[in-house]
């Protein structure tokens, strides 16, 4: 099985290689086709689907995976959200979403000003490259859940749906 993931982010690549250990996994920098900072479940999901679709278009008989992080409102509170999509060589699409955690007002204000979550997190946590390491989820869960772990969970959902679908 050959999988192309639509990201060069090491946490996303590692999530896919961990959950599909026997697959040949490569990565490309695939465009999401949505805002740099998705602001809803729908937009974040669409970004993941778009990335996965672009991956399958680059090489025949490959599976595409798109993983997208975003934010969304629930009851006037801003939450971190994340989505994944897996597209099969014949065009079947599987999607799944994972962990959510409330974001502080300070982060919400920065996002409304047009800044990206990854940039805000570097300043907030006084670290560099949070998006390539523990992620916002790692910061706000006191590193009990890492960004790779969060995306690994989503990739497990995708793999499970794929395997279930293959049995049908």
Image (spheres, rainbow, N blue to C red):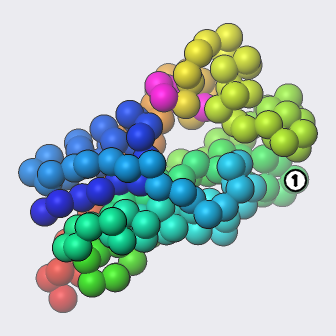
Vertical position of residue 118 compared to residue 26: above or below: above
Inspect the magenta stretch and tell me whether residue 80 lies in it: no
Number of other residues with Cα within 10 Å of mark 1, as a class: few under 14, some 14 to 19, many 20 or more? few
Question: Residue placed at 85% from the left, 29% from the top?
Answer: 106
In the rendered image, residue 123, in percent from the top left (x then y), is placed at 73, 17
Q: Is residue 136 visible?
A: yes
Residue placed most toward the observer, 105 or 60: 60
Vertical position of residue 142 compared to residue 105: above or below: above
Residue placed most toward the observer, 92 or 97: 92
Inspect the magenta stretch and tell me whether residue 135 lies in it: yes
Q: Is residue 79 left or right of residue 99?
A: right
Vertical position of residue 116 compared to residue 40: above or below: above
Q: Is residue 15 left or right of residue 113?
A: left
Question: Residue placed at 72% from the left, 38% from the top?
Answer: 116
Q: Which residue is mark 1?
A: 76
Q: Quadrant of residue 121?
A: top right
Q: Quadrant of the C terminus?
A: bottom left
In the rendered image, residue 99, in percent from the top left (x then y), is placed at 53, 48
Residue placed most toward the observer, 57 or 34: 57
Helix, strand or loop at label 1? It is loop
Q: Which residues are magenta?
A: 132-136
Q: Quadrant of the N terminus?
A: bottom left
Question: Residue placed at 51% from the left, 67% from the top?
Answer: 50
How many marks can you see? 1
């Amino acid at each position: 099985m050959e999988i192309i993931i639509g990201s060069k982010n090491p946490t996303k690549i590692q999530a896919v290689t961990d959950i599909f250990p026997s697959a040949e996994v490569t990565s490309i920098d695939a465009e999401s086709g949505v805002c740099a900072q998705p602001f809803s479940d729908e937009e974040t999901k669409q970004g993941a689907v778009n990335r996965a679709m672009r991956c399958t278009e680059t090489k025949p008989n490959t599976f595409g995976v798109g993983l997208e992080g975003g934010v969304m409102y629930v009851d006037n509170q801003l939450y971190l959200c994340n989505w994944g999509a897996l597209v099969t060589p014949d065009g079947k699409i599987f999607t799944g979403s994972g962990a959510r955690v409330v974001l502080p007002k300070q982060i919400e204000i920065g996002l409304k000003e047009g800044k990206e979550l990854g940039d805000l997190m570097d300043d907030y946590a006084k670290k560099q490259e949070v998006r390539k390491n523990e992620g916002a989820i790692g910061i706000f869960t006191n590193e009990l859940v890492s960004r790779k772990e969060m995306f690994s969970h989503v990739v497990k959902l995708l793999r499970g749906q794929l395997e279930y679908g293959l049995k049908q």
